[in-house]
């Protein structure tokens, strides 16, 4: 296993800032080094074609498109689904709105209807109230609903499948596409126990990140119908995302899908252990209940947040600020049991 530790001023650190910090294992590096490649813009890279076919089949979709990031797959999907002047419905803390550089407005010329909800999750009932009347020219046309599962700002919260089913039914009845920002979709699947294809059936398009809990160094897949993906391929080119011999990086994603999915519950176990340790810290007011691999703690004294983060850093643990008086820790495949034990002991001593 590749170590998650980095060196800060010659000190070895346990990096819990995000699951994006994972390093490719030696086995993954070997797969990448040996990957057959070709020109992907000509649809001639065999490794990318294999990855796209594997991902599409896994989630029961007709086709897939390999892209450089989850932001790119999300923004491409929105651009295909939505016409300029249209409106996207999503949670007010969703990644597509909050952390993608204003891409919905810049790339697609669309407005956003932001809904409140429990830990990053919205409901069919809430969505139905904000479907704009198509006959009234005062309102933008509602053209897309987007969910995020797990919800990053919700501390890794997982949607109830029954709620997703209701949202999907509502969207189908209104001929409204439903997109999934599945940056950590395999964490959600590890909790709800659904087969990816059964889960994928609820959505018209899905973004799957390969570089977080799955441990690939770069890349995401966009999944959907063959017609949708062909349109997405054109948008990817327009956005400068056409890649050539990218099978070298696609091989890391393929290895991740084939080898690193079943171990994800271990990350959830480590996160629960960190949750328990944080709850023993006198500085901590509460910890958002952990469902997956994200741990969000709220300090009693919000002004001491940066001090708390610096104290952990001095002891060899990296975490990140997550809002006023809040810190975030994220477990991943490079956090070992011994790393977790060290973090627990450190927190208990604090």
Image (cartoon, helix red, strand yellow):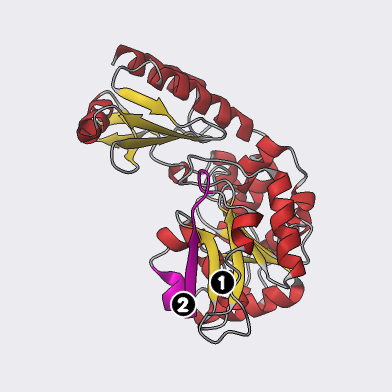
173 and 204: which is toward the camera: 173
Magenta-drawn segment: 102-120
User: In the drawing, does residue 16 fall left or right of residue 8?
Assistant: right
Kindly state the secondary structure of the residue where label 2 is placed: helix
> Looking at the image, can residue 82 be seen?
yes
Q: Position of residue 330 (x, y in %)?
A: 45, 36
Give x and y (percent) for residue 91: 51, 56
The image quadrant where one finds the C terminus is top left
Disc 1, SS? helix
Contact flag, marks 1 and 2 (Cβ < 8 Å)? yes
Q: Residue at x 48, y 46 (%)?
A: 152
Q: Residue at x 62, y 75 (%)?
A: 81
According to the picture, the residue beneath numbered tag 1 turns out to be: 78
Residue 132: where, in percent of width, then height? 58, 74
139 to 93, vertically: above or below: below
Q: Which residue is mark 2?
A: 107
290 in relation to 40, above or below: above
Q: Viewed as shown, does residue 147 lie left or right of 92?
A: right
- Relative to the observer, which residue lies in front, 214 or 46? 214
């Amino acid at each position: 296993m590749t170590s998650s530790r980095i060196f800060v001023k010659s000190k070895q650190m346990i990096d819990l800032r995000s699951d994006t910090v994972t390093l490719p294992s030696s086995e993954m590096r070997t797969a990448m080094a040996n990957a057959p490649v070709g020109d992907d813009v000509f649809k001639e890279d065999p490794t990318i074609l294999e990855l796209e076919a594997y991902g599409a089949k896994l989630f029961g979709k007709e086709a897939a498109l390999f892209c450089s990031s989850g932001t790119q797959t999300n923004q491409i999907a929105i651009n295909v689904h939505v016409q300029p002047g249209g409106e996207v419905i999503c949670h007010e803390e969703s990644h597509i709105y909050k952390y993608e550089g204003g891409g919905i407005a810049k790339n697609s010329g669309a407005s956003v209807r932001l809904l409140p909800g429990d830990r990053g999750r919205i409901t069919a009932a809430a969505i139905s109230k904000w479907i704009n009347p198509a006959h009234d020219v005062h309102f933008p046309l509602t053209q897309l609903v987007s969910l995020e599962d797990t919800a990053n700002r919700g501390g890794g919260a997982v949607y109830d499948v029954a709620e997703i089913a209701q949202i999907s039914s509502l969207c189908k009845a209104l001929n409204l596409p439903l997109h999934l920002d599945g940056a950590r979709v395999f964490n959600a699947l590890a909790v709800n126990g659904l087969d990816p294809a059964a889960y994928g059936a609820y959505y018209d398009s899905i973004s799957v990140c390969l570089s977080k809990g799955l441990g690939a160094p770069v890349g995401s897949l966009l999944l959907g119908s063959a017609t949708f993906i062909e349109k997405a391929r054109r948008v990817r080119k327009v956005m400068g995302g056409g890649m050539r011999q990218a099978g070298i990086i696609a091989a890391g994603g393929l290895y991740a899908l084939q080898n690193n999915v079943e171990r994800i519950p271990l990350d959830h176990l480590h996160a629960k252990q960190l949750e328990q340790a944080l709850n023993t810290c006198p500085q901590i007011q509460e910890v958002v209940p952990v469902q997956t691999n994200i741990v969000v703690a709220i300090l009693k004294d919000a002004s001491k947040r940066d001090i708390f983060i610096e104290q952990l850093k001095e002891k060899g643990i990296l975490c990140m600020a997550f809002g006023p008086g809040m810190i975030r820790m994220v477990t991943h495949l490079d956090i070992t049991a011994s790393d977790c034990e060290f973090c627990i002991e450190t927190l208990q001593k604090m």
